[in-house]
Image (tube, helix red, strand yellow):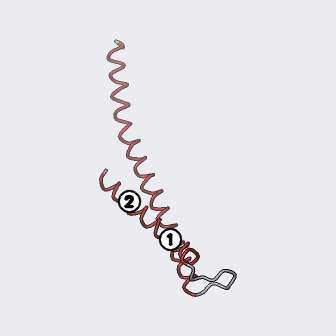
């Protein structure tokens, strides 16, 4: 569980870095409004976009894995509850 939280925190940080790289040329102002994109702007936007997409995919993968673990943990508990219900009902 701790590893999942640390991993999620890392992926959120990578996602935030990617979003910042996409926004930085315009937020900081080294891309002039109305002018063609400079090489630095293109590099930042492409790199940031790839980082954000990779982090989002990682977040999705970690979340899907955790949901799978929760379902796997719930199956034995559900079968134990069903067994206890049968024993208590006298069947």
Front disc: 1 or 2: 1
Q: What is the secondary structure assignment of the residue under circle 1? A: helix
In the displayed orientation, state which residue is furthest to the right.
34
Q: Residue at x 34, y 35 (%)?
A: 76
Residue 72, given in percent of the width and then of the height, sits at 38, 42
Report which residue position mark 1 lands on: 20
Query: Seen in the image, is 15 located left or right of residue 29?
Result: left
In the displayed orientation, state which residue is furthest to the bottom.
39
Q: Which mark is residue 65?
A: none
Q: Nearer the viewer, residue 28 or 87?
A: 28
Q: Residue at x 39, y 43 (%)?
A: 70
Residue 90, given in percent of the width and then of the height, sits at 34, 12
Rendered image quadrant of residue 25: bottom right
**Distance Cα–Cα, label 1 vs label 2:** 16 Å
Q: Nearer the viewer, residue 57 or 82?
A: 57
Q: Nearer the viewer, residue 1 or 64?
A: 1
In the displayed orientation, state which residue is furthest to the left.
2
Decide: is 27 above or below 15. below
Mark 1 and 2 residues: CB-CB less than 8 Å, in contact? no
Count of marks overlaid on the render: 2
Report which residue position mark 2 lands on: 9
The crowd level at tag 2 (other Cα within 10 Å; few <14, some 14-19, many 20+) is: few
- Point out the image quarter for the C terminus: top left
Residue 57, given in percent of the width and then of the height, sits at 49, 62
Query: Seen in the image, is 78 located left or right of residue 40?
Result: left
Residue 4, given in percent of the width and then of the height, sits at 35, 55
Q: What is the secondary structure assignment of the residue under circle 2? A: helix
Q: Nearer the viewer, residue 57 or 8?
A: 8
Decide: is 64 above or below 27. above
Which one is earlier in the sequence, the residue at label 1 or at label 2?
2
């Amino acid at each position: 569980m701790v590893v999942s939280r640390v991993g999620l925190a890392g992926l959120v940080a990578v996602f935030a870095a990617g979003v910042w790289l996409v926004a930085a040329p315009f937020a900081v102002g080294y891309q002039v409004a109305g002018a063609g994109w400079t090489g630095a702007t293109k590099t930042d936007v492409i790199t940031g976009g790839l980082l954000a997409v990779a982090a989002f995919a990682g977040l999705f993968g970690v979340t899907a894995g955790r949901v799978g673990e929760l379902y796997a943990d719930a199956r034995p508990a559900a079968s134990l509850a069903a067994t206890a219900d049968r024993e208590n009902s006298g069947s």
